[in-house]
Amino acid sequence: MRIGILGLGRIGAFHAETLSGLDAVESLVLADPFADAAKSAAERFGGEVADSPEAVLAAGVDGIVVAAATDAHPALILAAVQAGVPVFCEKPVAKTMSEGVEVLRAVQGGDVPIQIGYNRRFDAGFVAARAAVHSGELGKLHTVRSTTLDPAPPPAAYIAASGGIFRDCSVHDFDIIRWVTGREVTEVYAVGGNRGADFIKAAGDADTTGAILTLDDGTIAVVSNSRHNARGYDVRMELHGFTDSIAVGLEDKLPLRSVEPGVTFPAGTPHDFFMDRFTAAYRAELTAFTEVVAGTRPSPCTIEDALEAGWIAEACTLSLHEHRPVTIAEVRTA
């Protein structure tokens, strides 16, 4: 099949490399507002360069990957849908939830598949955790712990436009908690602090946060996030049930050091970047998209899924600012 890629920055170029190695993909058509970015990716991974999204859609592509700036996501999703081309879009659907809801309303009832990029759904550990929960082998869950710790903050300009740590970072934890447990979040309570980069506080954001999520069956989920984790990129999940307990991310590249006498675990070089931690998951995610394009599977992460994680982020942001519990119903507008 022939796949178009819109946006050839860091993640777009990474997707171009991944797609170029998939057997199902015969050719790529690349476009970026900065022509040199598209040209560089074409030279490295193969493919044709187009001068606009419209040109990509007119080039006979079977599917489109949207890796452009967030502000462009709604228009590019809708353009692909209007052209009848299946679309994969990196999260979020839109910069604001109201825009995301507008996109959902515009595509509801249509038959063009849309997949949103929440890559943890394709990580082997999280897949195994979901299977363990749904098989019943853990018994009823009572506690979930989900962690995302970045090795260092992104640039100040990124932070200023990110929408805040809950919308930008924690939302991955929110999505994977929903997906692994199969439950919905009903209420949140969030706290945050700033003990690191001054530009994060200046942007009105927190650099380290914690959130308590109450799920609809009474399970408690604890989410921990930080922009500062000098040892590396740390993504983990624990699931505790009345029959058994399991963990995702408990392996030799875990960025954590034990001080117990005689303990040598973890012994590997710590993960230092999300592309390192989730290389295989990204490949599985884009392989899934080729199956969506081929019509052999439904979208594994819909706009509705992405918006549900977004409402949790909205609730946590409000909770942090107002120092109180917030229900999802309070922030939901659709």
Image: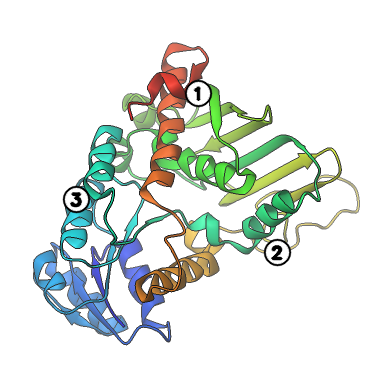
Q: Is residue 205 above or below residue 63?
A: above
Please name the residue that numbered disc 2 is placed on.
268
> Callout 2: few (<14), some (14-19), or many (20+) C-alpha neighbours within 10 Å?
few
Circles 3 and 2 in contact, beta carbons < 8 Å = no
Helix, strand or loop at mark 1? strand
Q: Residue furthest front?
A: 109
Residue at (43%, 86%) from the top-left corner?
A: 23
Q: Around disc 3, counting alpha carbons within 10 Å, would you say few (fewer than 14), some (14 to 19), or many (20 or more)?
A: some
Left or right, 300 with reference to 106:
right
Point 27% across, 35% down: residue: 96
Q: Which residue: 56% across, 52% down?
A: 233
- CB atoms at circles 1 and 3 under 8 Å apart? no
In primary-sequence order, the first of circles 3 and 2 is: 3
Residue 316: x, y in percent? 47, 25
Residue 261 lies left or right of residue 203; in this view the side is right
Labels 1, 3: front one: 3
Does residue 173 appear in the picture of this structure? yes
Where disc 2 sits, the SS reads: loop
Q: Tell me the SS state at disc 3.
A: helix
- On screen, 120 above or below 146? below
Colour scheme? rainbow
Number of other residues with Cα within 10 Å of mark 1, as a class: few under 14, some 14 to 19, many 20 or more:
some
Q: What amino acid does circle 2 point to?
A: Gly
Residue 24 location (% of width, % of height): 40, 84
The span from disc 1 to disc 3 (Cα, nearest Å) is: 31 Å
Residue 72 numbered tag:
3
